[in-house]
Image (cartoon, rainbow, N blue to C red):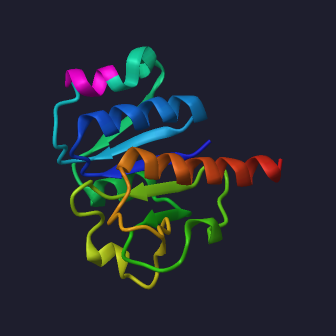
Amino acid sequence: MFNIVLYEPEIPQNTGNIGRLCVGLNAVLHLIEPLGFSLEDKYMKRAGLDYWKYLDLKIYKNFDEFLKKNNPERIFYFSKKVEKPYWEGRFEKGDFLVFGKETMGLPEKIVFNPENKVYKIPMVGKTRSLNLSNSVAIVAYEAFRQVSLRG
């Protein structure tokens, strides 16, 4: 359905939750190294429960390798540093949805590249940012909703 891309994820529980979400949406999970944990991490596996055997997981040494191997035509980035809300994105089946690492987000060279489609999840409270797995779920289900409505 979709491709969920995590740029240098740091927290195993988040990646485990996102892996479980990917299984539920028939999405591919792409991890871009370096990872802040081992793929054998018990917390990551616990968060993903027994769904890991169903997960379509791809791992890359760096962002350039990811781009080279996938050559994505439709790629969306998500960052708190921009103003355009995620629901303005027009998502289609097969899109790549890219999220940054928990502590720093995506690199500025990606976020502020005028050629890139970059969106944010608006917040009205005093929170600086949302949990990565929550952010992925919000955007992934909006993308799913849009594709489902169009048939």
Q: What is the chief secondary structure element of the magenta stretch?
A: helix
Residue range (magenta): 41-46
Q: Identify the residue at horizontal 32%, vertical 66% (top origin).
A: 128
Query: What residue occupies the far top of the structure in this picture?
Result: 50
- Front-lying residue, 32 or 121: 121
Q: Quadrant of the N terminus?
A: top right
Query: What residue occupies the far bottom of the structure in this picture?
Result: 114
Across and down, in percent, residue 114 comes to: 44, 85
Across and down, in percent, residue 67 comes to: 37, 59
Q: Identify the residue at horizontal 26%, vertical 47% (top origin).
A: 9
Across and down, in percent, residue 102 comes to: 26, 54
Placement of 90 over or under 3, stated as above or below: below
Q: Identify the residue at horizontal 29%, vertical 60% (top origin).
A: 64
- Front-lying residue, 32 or 142: 142
Placement of 11 over or under 106, stated as above or below: above
- Front-lying residue, 89 or 132: 132
- Front-lying residue, 140 or 75: 140
Placement of 104 over or under 69, stated as above or below: below
Magenta stretch: residue 45 in it?
yes
Q: Identify the residue at horizontal 30%, vertical 22% (top origin).
A: 45
Q: How many marks?
A: 0
Across and down, in percent, residue 112 comes to: 36, 82
The answer to whether residue 84 is left or right of residue 6 is right
